[in-house]
Amino acid sequence: MSSSRRSLMTMAAALGASAFVGGPRPGNAATDVTSLRATTRTLDVNGRAATVLGLLQADGRQGIVIPPGERFRVRLVNGLSEPTIIHWHGQTPPVEQDGVADVPLPMLAPGATRDFDYAPNSGTHWMHAHVPDQEMRLLAAPLIVRTKEDVRADRQEVVLMLHDFSFTPLGEHLARLGSEGAGHGPAAHANAGAAAMDLNDIDFDAYLANDRTLADPQVVRIERGGRVLLRIINGAGATVFWIDTGTLRGTLVAVDGHAVEPQPGARIGLAMGQRVDIVLEVPREGGAFPILALREGARQQTGIVLATAGMPITRIAPEADAVAAPFDGGQELRLHAVSPLPMRRPDRALHVTLNGGMTPYAWSIDSQPWGRHRLLEVRRGERVELTMENRSMMAHPMHLHGHAFQVVGIGSQRFAGAVRDTVHVPPMGRVTIAIDMEKPGRWMFHCHHMPHLAAGMMTELRYVG
């Protein structure tokens, strides 16, 4: 089967199961503009209707797939009854197109539109509201930028986007956490070895894979003896997942849209905001293969099923037999970029502390919440090393806007790690990243745990001089 036909079959299979990922834009003209509408939609969550948000193309599909070499040309329409703003996570557009309220442009009022036009970064990325409550109401979608190598490759592409979902609004969760603290429920101390850590501060009503639970999972048809590129996005607001490919042999080939030296394995940790690309080898005899996402420190799981033609699909329980282990981030030491940053001595060293706790429920950077934050000042052309010291008992997936960075230190160990835009900083851990300062502006730096962000765990990196 030709690679072009394989790509079309993959899109048809994915879209036939759920209108989740939009295919390539019609035509290839340089002037094509994709209309993307922030709107409401209804999901069936284990038999209960749920009104959520979404980013939809004109034909109702979620997400965008951009062919090789095309620009990101999008007209964003706010079809909501509330202001919103969308961040293009993993992209590095000019700062005015980054999608943060008042940096420098205001949020979009209901009914307003805004145009975006820039050269996109290739890889597996996503787009989401830069408003914690809206992101947790699922105002998010995949953003896939394909390369010429993707088009030539003899493999199917499947996108898997993960969410946690609650019928309870974020404000009510924060009110409860603020009055009670956390760590009192079964998920908070689900593992005796993690008794000192607070792994999960919210128990969600459902965990979704491409908008569906394991009560009715998406089934994507694949070829016997073929290869699958599985692009996985953790769009959850407050849940780390373990990705389990089961009996399928998998090789991790990229993180956050950046290639890494291939890493074989069947289980991969994925923090909020992070993405992984995994190449799967399908046996010639075929079969039905669950791809599961297990909630850290708990038994809940979600996922999709990859299946060859004619194979029966067995029901998958919504809970695993055992509690998933804490994600300590140790896998980061095994990841090495295919295209690392050039060797260079740092011009500037910055250090921040990640602070907070459950009682009271308060989170900050350098003990200062957003609005009273300490600026991280840099100059254009510098190589900056930023060390994050986590002084709390929860992990923090730290995301930097406008730049990719390379992980160069964990604890006291130096190494040439992966290139990323979001890195998991374990409880009481320390991570150092290297950044080349090439994009003047004001850029947000924050925890991608949405309740932590809502509580103020954000600062900004600002170019001066």
Image (cartoon, rainbow, N blue to C red):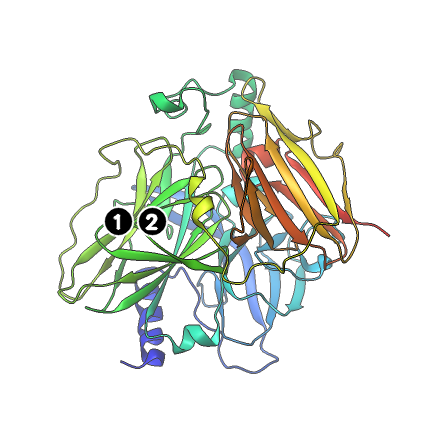
Q: Quote the CA–CA distance across marks 2 and 1.
A: 6 Å
Q: Position of residue 90 (x, y in %)?
A: 57, 56
Residue 121 found in image quarter: bottom right
Indicate the secondary structure of the residue bearing disc 1. loop
Q: Position of residue 96 (x, y in %)?
A: 73, 58
> Could you classify mark 2 by the number of other residues whose Cα lies within 10 Å: few (under 14), some (14-19), or many (20 or more)?
many
Q: Is residue 268 above or below residue 171?
A: below
Which disc is residue 232 wearing?
A: none
Hey, what amino acid is under mark 2? Arg
Identify the residue at image location x=50%, y=41%: 136
* Residue picked out by circle 2: 212
Indicate the secondary structure of the residue bearing disc 2. loop
Q: Where, quadrant-wise, is the N terminus in this rendering?
A: bottom left
Identify the residue at image location x=39%, y=32%: 326
Identify the residue at image location x=66%, y=38%: 458
Foreground residue among 55 and 238: 238
Which disc is residue 216 wearing?
A: 1
Q: Position of residue 127 (x, y in %)?
A: 54, 55
